[in-house]
Amino acid sequence: MFARTLLLVFLVWACGAAAAPAWTAFPVPEGSGPHDVAPAADGTVWFTAQAAGKLGRLDPGTGRVDEFSLGPGSAPHGVILGPDGAPWVTDGGLNAVLRFDPGTHAIRRFPLPANRPNANLNTATFDRAGRLWFTGQNGVYGQVDPQSGAVRVWDAPRGPGPYGIATTRSGAVYFASLAGGYIARIDTGSGAARVIEPPTPRQGARRVWPDARGTLWVSEFHAGQIARFEPEENAWRAWRLPGTDPQPYAIYVDERGTVWVSDFGAGALLRFDPASGRFDRVAGQAGETWIRQLLGRPGEVWGADSAHDRLIRVSEGE
């Protein structure tokens, strides 16, 4: 009986250990300053090497990294994969959105209008019609039509601040304003932005990400908390991160509904369980980690640690 009890205890421990996330760091060239990542369907991972003015591609299987120059003055911030399978880049240095052809390495540039200089382009998302929407932290948001090449720009409510942006499964596009302290829904037909006020004032809404139900999760950088917004009920709820001075930056919800958030105050990546309200530091982190953006594919969460020139993968156990 004692031996059977020990066996059961071991099996429970082993199952729990198998389910724990596995942390892997992939170095990129020194001086890259990786900012955002975009895992691709072929298993590779694209990233913006902001400090080097390049777009990078990691092969996690071999660890090989290729970097491609985006041109003089480039300072790429965000990268996402488009419906065409190509990486699209928001480049603050060039004040343009770029499409990089993964086969030919050709770059198509979509510059902002001349009357919109120095927008400080941040992040992008595609709507269901295949149009790209972007944010500029100096007070704008805009749209690129890949078919016509047209670029449209709107003034953001309250001026500077637009940062994170995302599209829900139903096709709604939302962005977060760090300096403005709000999230907004964009009417993808007219381009108008409707402000949605979080209950916490001056919270510093930085990144926004929808879960499978269309619920929005927001990293509230200045308030040290993450918030959940239910659009149908117009209801908010917030959870403060652990520690004395938390600064939630990146936020991402995976296919299982687990929320991942990076804390610049603690220099750590956390996993949050909405059901229990519990935050856990992801095991395996060596020293401090400053992840500015998170994205994933089934079973994996990826981030860029700009301070240490590396990409981070967290592989979830079954």
Image: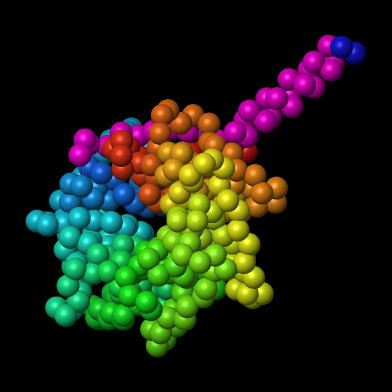
Q: In the rendered image, which quarter is residue 70 located in?
A: bottom left
Of residue 125 and residue 174, the one placed in the foreground of this image is 174
> Residue reaching furthest left?
72
Q: Inspect the magenta stretch and tell me whether residue 20 lies in it.
A: yes
Q: Inspect the magenta stretch and tell me whether residue 291 lies in it.
A: no
Of residue 199 and residue 154, the one placed in the foreground of this image is 199
Residue 229 location (% of width, % of height): 59, 67
Residue 149 location (% of width, % of height): 23, 78
Q: Is 255 situated above or below 196?
A: above
Q: Quadrant of the C terminus?
A: top right
Residue 257 in sight: yes
Residue plotted at (60% across, 43% down):
279
> Residue reaching furthest right?
1
The magenta span reads 3-31
Residue 197 location (% of width, % of height): 52, 73
Q: Quadrant of the N terminus?
A: top right
> Residue reaching furthest bottom?
190
Residue plotted at (47% across, 78% down):
195
Residue 238 location (% of width, % of height): 60, 58
